[in-house]
Image (cartoon, grey):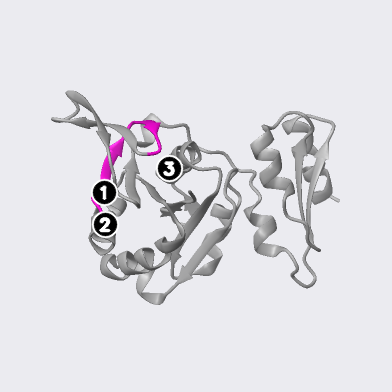
């Protein structure tokens, strides 16, 4: 049951809403991909750095410079055949797009999720937030938005950068992570790629120590 998160960008940076969506998606599936709709492929790099992302799918089209809702909805619906869940942070951006995606997929989107009870049961507010309702869906594909204040914002440090650059000529990518200080799931995400130019290294230090190693190399 793979999940796809729709990335919302603030300039070239991933929004807080999307970071919350990633945390929510990881509660639904161990396999989470990100989708970036943009007019500039360079904007996908910030999504690739997030911890928990397997693969970043990037769709580049000039019409996406100003978030063309009709075009974006069709593009998202077209890639959903490989996924059980589509998750996005609650925002004007997602609230314009996801209802149209739901219509194309013939499912009812669930908005403003605050808690995930199970893979098909969610808690969301009703009546201007005065009532919290538990919603259960029977849809085969689940389209949902989540409130950014209800989920932690995912940090950087994922394996998607390794996936993006593996096998590329003249490019080697190294990810350093502290030995024994990441979860089993996180370690598997960072070490499952076995390809030339993509290296994940377990280092006997803490997160600050990993950062210091990188900074010392930059300053050489």
Circle 1 residue: 109
Residue 96 left/right relative to 211: left
Q: CA distance from mark 3 to mark 1?
A: 15 Å
For marks 2 and 3, give the one nearer the viewer. Answer: 2
Magenta-span inclusion, residue 218: no
What residue sits 66% from the left and 50% below the top?
159
In the foreground, 5 or 184: 184
Work out whether mark 2 precedes mark 3 in sequence or the reverse, and give the earlier one.
3
Q: Residues within 10 Å of mark 2 (few under 14, many from 20)?
A: many
User: Quick one: SS at disc 3?
Assistant: helix
Rendering coords of residue 177 (x, y %): 75, 39
**SS for dot 2:** helix
* Residues under numbered marks 2 and 1 in contact, where contact means CB atoms less than 8 Å apart: yes
In space, the residues marked 2 and 1 are separated at their CA atoms by: 6 Å
Bounds of the magenta span? 107-119
Residue 35 % position (x, y): 47, 59
**Residue linked to disc 2:** 102
Residue at image coords 17%, 23%: 130
């Amino acid at each position: 049951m793979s999940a796809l998160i729709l990335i919302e960008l603030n300039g070239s940076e991933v929004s807080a809403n999307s970071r919350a969506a990633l945390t929510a998606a990881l509660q639904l599936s161990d396999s989470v991909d990100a989708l970036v709709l943009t007019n500039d492929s360079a904007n996908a790099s910030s999504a690739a750095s997030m911890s928990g992302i397997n693969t970043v799918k990037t769709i580049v089209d000039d019409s996406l410079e100003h978030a063309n809702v009709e075009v974006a909805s069709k593009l998202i619906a077209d890639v959903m055949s490989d996924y059980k869940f589509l998750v996005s942070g609650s925002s004007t951006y997602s609230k314009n797009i996801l209802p149209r995606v739901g219509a194309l997929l013939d499912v009812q989107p669930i908005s403003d999720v605050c808690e995930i009870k199970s893979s098909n049961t969610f808690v969301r507010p009703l009546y201007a937030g005065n009532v919290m309702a538990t919603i259960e869906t029977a849809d085969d594909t689940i389209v949902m938005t989540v409130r950014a204040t209800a989920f932690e914002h995912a940090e950087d440090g994922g394996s998607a950068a390794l996936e993006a650059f593996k096998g590329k000529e003249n490019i080697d990518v190294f990810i350093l992570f502290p030995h024994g200080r990441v979860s089993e799931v996180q370690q598997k995400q960072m070490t499952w790629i076995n390809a030339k130019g993509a290296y994940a290294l377990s280092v006997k230090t803490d997160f600050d120590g990993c950062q210091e190693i990188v900074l010392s190399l930059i300053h050489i």
